[in-house]
Amino acid sequence: MSDEQQAITEEQRQQTKLIWDYHQMHHEIQPADVAIGLGSHDLGVAAYSAELYRAGLFPHLVFTGGNSPTTAAVFPRGEAVHFREHAIELGVPAAAILLEPDAANTGQNITLSRELLAAAGIVPKTVLLVSKPYMERRSFATARKLWPEVEVLCASEPLELDDYLKSIGDEKLVLDMLVGDLQRVIEYPRLGFAIEQNVPEDVHAAYESLIRDGFTSRLLKP
């Protein structure tokens, strides 16, 4: 762990676990008309999308995402481009993948993917969103707001929190992102970006405690 990384306490780890569990929708994965792999810093999204494709769960796979401050250095040609390349390496035919390289946020991930599919003559009734584990709920709420006519299912790599922390290698960054995503789940409905989601009291208390402890780098700017 570098000097810049912040060791987390056992209490903070338990609070994070509450938020981690809340962020996941726990949907039963079922066949869908299309899957959309949401771009991020986590290449595991591409790998899990490829695994689900090889399992025969969908015929079409969209990768969506440009760049963000978190990903520009890691994926210099854009998140979706790198995700597509990785999925092809893992056995997904290039012809099964549609590329959306411009989205800069989750709302654009959804709307630009929908437009891309429509341009290809694909009008799905069921959509499987594949994301980072802690992005499931926000992506679900966003899609239900912006694409209400489709049935939305969510999936992510089946990892426990500790395993995910090890895979990313920066505990402070992951906690910051979990807190930031929860803030968006809470705040985005009133801004018209997502449907409202009930946040249990213990999850909200954990969120406020982690903010007080300084896990704030991914919070929305006032």
Image (cartoon, rainbow, N blue to C red):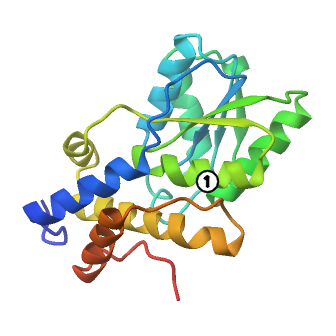
Residue drawn at the location 82% of the way across and 39% of the way down: 116
Is the N terminus in the top left, top right, bottom left or bottom right quadrant? bottom left
- In terms of image quadrants, where is residue 152? top right
Residue drawn at the location 44% of the way across and 44% of the way down: 132
- In terms of image quadrants, where is residue 36? top right
- Which of 148/214 is in front? 148
Q: Is residue 102 visible?
A: no
Q: Is residue 81 visible?
A: yes
Residue drawn at the location 16% of the way across and 69% of the way down: 6
Q: Compared with residue 156, is residue 101 higher up or lower down, i.e. above or below?
A: below
Relative side of 20 to 23, left or right: left
Which residue corresponds to mark 1?
141
Relative side of 8 to 27, left or right: left
Q: Position of residue 11 (x, y in %)?
A: 12, 64
What's the residue type where badge 1 is placed? Ala
Q: Position of residue 86 (x, y in %)?
A: 50, 29
